[in-house]
């Protein structure tokens, strides 16, 4: 099942990466794509942390990043999230496969406060994907510009799942593991 929208998408053919050196704070390591987590929500939070750090390090803050969490042996994992192109920074393709259990988006940061405010909740289309388009109604998670993780599981209600800390930087890079 594939979807196309200016705010959503991912193709699951991205290579796995290693993020053992990345941290949101000195106490909050990001384990990265390919790691197995006990819960789908733990994989989502790590994936969104990965997206936040990667976008800051790469200088690609305005580009959309999307990942899909899938069931894996011993828990849940995600592959390296997809990144929108520079020509279409808010458009990607993604595919939910049989083993997919959730999808997540790191919204592009806008310099305009007014525009950033619109990224603090799921779009109408993202809610339609969960409510109507996806027959399994898999949840959608977003990392907003204010670093809130918001889940949409259907029926018109969003849920604040967590607040991620802003990445800590030293010399332009995330702090290395100690």
Image: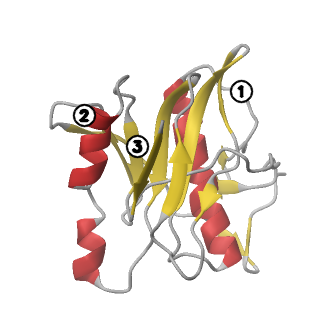
Name the residue that disc number 3 marks: 141
How many numbered callouts? Answer: 3
Residue that lies at the very extreme toward the front in this rendered image = 1
Q: Which colour assignment does the render follow?
A: secondary structure
Q: Do the residues under discs 2 and 3 have CB atoms within 8 angstroms?
A: no
Q: Do the residues under discs 1 and 2 have CB atoms within 8 angstroms?
A: no
Name the residue that disc number 1 marks: 36
Name the residue that disc number 2 marks: 132
The quadrant where residue 144 appears: bottom left
At 24% across and 33% down in the image, what residue appears? 131
Residue 105 vertical placement versus 79 (above, below): below
Residue that lies at the very extreme toward the left in this rendered image = 156
Of mark 3 and mark 1, the one earlier in the sequence is: 1
Q: Secondary structure at mark 3?
A: strand
Q: Secondary structure at mark 1?
A: loop
C-alpha distance separating marks 3 and 1: 18 Å
Nearest the eye: 101 or 40: 101
Residue that lies at the very extreme toward the bottom in this rendered image = 111
In this rendering, the label closer to the viewer, 1 or 2 = 2
Residue 59 vertical placement versus 25 (above, below): below
- Residue 32 position within the rendered picture, expressed as x and y whole percent measured from the top left: 72, 45
The quadrant where residue 171 appears: bottom right
Nearest the eye: 114 or 31: 114
């Amino acid at each position: 099942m594939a979807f196309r929208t200016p705010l959503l998408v991912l193709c699951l053919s991205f290579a796995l990466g290693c993020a053992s050196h990345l941290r949101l704070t000195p106490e909050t390591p990001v384990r990265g794509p390919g790691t197995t987590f006990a819960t789908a929500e733990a994989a989502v939070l790590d994936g969104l942390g990965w997206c936040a750090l990667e976008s800051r390090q790469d200088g690609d803050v305005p580009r959309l990043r999307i990942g899909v969490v899938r069931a894996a042996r011993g828990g849940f994992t995600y592959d390296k999230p997809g990144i929108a192109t520079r020509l279409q920074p808010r458009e990607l393709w993604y595919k939910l496969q049989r083993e997919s259990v959730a999808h997540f988006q790191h919204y592009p940061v806008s310099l305009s406060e007014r525009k950033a405010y619109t990224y603090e909740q799921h779009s109408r289309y993202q809610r339609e994907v969960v409510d109507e388009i996806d027959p399994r109604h898999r949840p959608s998670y977003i990392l907003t510009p204010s670093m809130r993780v918001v889940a949409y599981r259907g029926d018109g209600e969003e849920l604040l799942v967590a607040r991620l800390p802003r990445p800590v930087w030293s010399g332009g890079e995330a702090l290395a593991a100690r």
